[in-house]
Amino acid sequence: MSGAVQMGYVPPTDSRPPAAGPRWPGWLVALTVAWAVLLAGLTWFSTRNDPPTVREQRTLTEAGPVVDGAIGELVAAASDGVPAMVPPEVHRGCRVTPFADGATLSREVELAVPGGEERAVLERIAERLPAKWRAGVRVTPDGPRLRADAGEFVVVQGRPVTDGRIRLAVDTGCRPIGDGYDRPGPGDAGAGAEVGGLAEALRALGGAGAGSELAVTAPCPGGGVARTAWSGVGEPGKSPQAALASLAGGTPVVETPEVYAYRRGGVAVLADLRPDGVRVAATSGCAG
């Protein structure tokens, strides 16, 4: 039976190992790696630069306290300069969805700083803001830019607008309006030293005051309330710089043809020197 073959057994016909599966071409592997690197780079860039997206359709009503708190943080962090809070603005008409209207809430702080120190001041502000905001300053072809995330998809930005002048802005992006934005009140203490500082500056300027507004407030991070009182002044009786020099003790924080700013008795006074008159802001609260 030497030539017999056992039933159920098929003799091997090839002793070579099975052939390997199909291999990817080298160009396809390289393309896949390049695509992964590109996606990683775009993700990083988007995280650093794109405005926050509103999550879960949070309303303007819910975002309002976050914005107000962020303004207080900025005032406290801006101890190197002379801040003045600008009245909040609500812009309606944006579209949350193709079928739903929305609105954007924005608030700003104008900050007078010594000329040439704008970038250094922005960097110090970024260092003083809450760590969870991940604030940072980067240099762009248009100058230094501060960026931070105040939470709840509220973005914080800062940039120089002229020599010796920085604008800090807080913005919600387009959101459902909800019950609308409820502006913060003056707090338990009501009007404070800023009213006296404003009146003192107006008397020194010798112009006719257009009435003061005590409507711009924000909660301070350590408690209390920051307040800014604004007033317009007609043609001053003499040079604004000369008129305010005694109040600044001869050493203003900023003195340019457009801005005169100083601190006196815990009040920051910023005078915008315009061709049609002077607009003065006095701010108190939120020690840095």
Image: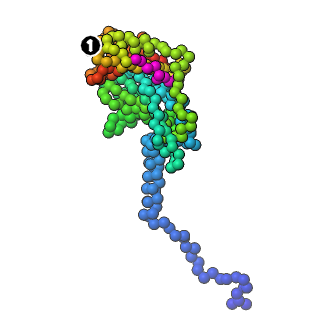
Nearest the viewer among 91 and 40 is 91
Is 43 or 84 nearer to us in this picture?
A: 84
> In this picture, which residue range is highlighted in magenta?
211-219
Does the stretch in magenta take in 208? no
The secondary element bearing badge 1 is classed as loop
Please give the name of the residue rendered at 50% of the width and 24% of the height, measured from the top-left corner. Answer: 218
Please give the name of the residue rendered at 36% of the width and 34% of the height, measured from the top-left corner.
144
80 above or below 153? above
Total marks shown come to: 1
Q: Is residue 19 visible?
A: yes
**Is residue 155 visible from the viewing direction of this image?**
no
Residue 80 place in picture, x, y as percent:
40, 21
Residue 283: image quadrant is top left
Task: Give the quarter of the figure containing the N terminus.
Answer: bottom right
Q: Nearer the viewer, residue 120 or 244?
A: 244
Residue 216 on the magenta span: yes
Q: Is residue 101 left or right of residue 81?
A: right
Q: Residue at x 43, y 34 (%)?
A: 157
- Percent across and percent down for residue 178 are 56, 37
Q: Is residue 196 above or below residue 143?
A: above
Percent x, y of residue 116: 31, 26
Residue 110, how many percent across, how many down?
39, 26
Q: Main secondary structure of the magenta part?
A: strand
Q: Residue placed at 44% from the left, 15% from the top?
A: 194
- Figure quadrant of residue 230: top left
The colour style of the image is rainbow
Type of amino acid at the residue the image marks with label 1: Lys
Q: Residues within 10 Å of mark 1 (few under 14, many from 20)?
A: few
Image vertical order of residue 55 relative to residue 184, above or below: below
What residue sits right under mark 1 in the picture?
238
